[in-house]
Amino acid sequence: MSKMKSLKLAYIAALVIGIVILLAIIVVLVAPLSPLQQAQPRAPTVEITLIGGEFDDKYGFAFEGQALSSPGPTLKVKVGETVKINFINKGQIPHTFAIVQELKFDATPLFGASIGSPSKPIFPDVESSIIFTANRAGSFSYICTVPGHLERGMLGKIIIEE
Ligand SMILES: [Cu+2]
């Protein structure tokens, strides 16, 4: 009787080991296709460096090496491009960068394109960047999302061309 019992146990153990090996093989085969791996950002096809800061009694943006203006320079990219925006705060106070549809400091950023936020802004002399896919054509705005900065003119246009 006890021999039958241990045979049964051995059979169950072999079955469990078999299932574990089978699962391990499936994990190894499926892992390269997992969404985690697909979510890796692609290499940018376009790179733009913008500075932000204060000038006169306004706040504005500019391409690196140019004078700040309000509105900032119009950015143009083609739909489908993988865009890298580098943002450097050249001002004395914290700023951010975000692409939005509506000119509201708390608008939801489009394309996940935001650098810093009002609660975690980019501090003076700090550079930060974002990579996003411009997957919809249209005319949008980029703004600083720190409350009050939009009203001081910290905005510009971004055109995503067909
Ligand atoms: Cu700002």
Image (tube, helix red, strand yellow):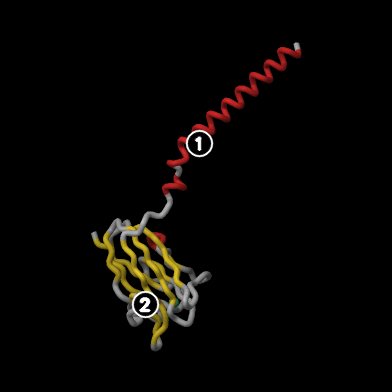
Of badges 1 and 2, the one in the foreground is 1
Asked if ligand 1 lies within 8 A of label 1, the reply is: no
- Disc 1 target residue: 27
Please, what is the three-letter code of the amino acid marked with disc 2? Phe
Q: Is residue 51 visible?
A: yes
Dot 2 crowding, Cα within 10 Å, few <14, some 14–19, many 20+:
many
Question: Which structural element holds mark 2?
Answer: strand
Q: Quadrant of residue 151?
A: bottom left
Task: Tell me the residue at 31%/71% (across/down).
Answer: 157
Residue 14, given in percent of the width and then of the height, sits at 62, 22
The foreground one among 155 and 62 is: 62
**Label 1 secondary element:** helix
Q: Position of residue 118 (x, y in %)?
A: 50, 71
The residue most toward the right is: 2
Left or right: residue 138 compared with residue 88: left
Residue lying farthest to the bottom in this orientation: 56
Looking at the image, which residue is at 61% across and 26% down? 16
Q: Which quarter shows the C terminus? A: bottom left
Q: Which of the 4 quarters of the picture holds residue 90?
A: bottom left
Residue shown at 45% from the left, 78% from the top = 148
Instruction: Tell me, yes or no, if residue 134 can be seen here.
Output: no
Specify which label sits upstream in the sequence, 1 or 2: 1
Q: Is residue 129 above or below residue 10?
A: below
Q: Which residue is mark 2?
A: 61
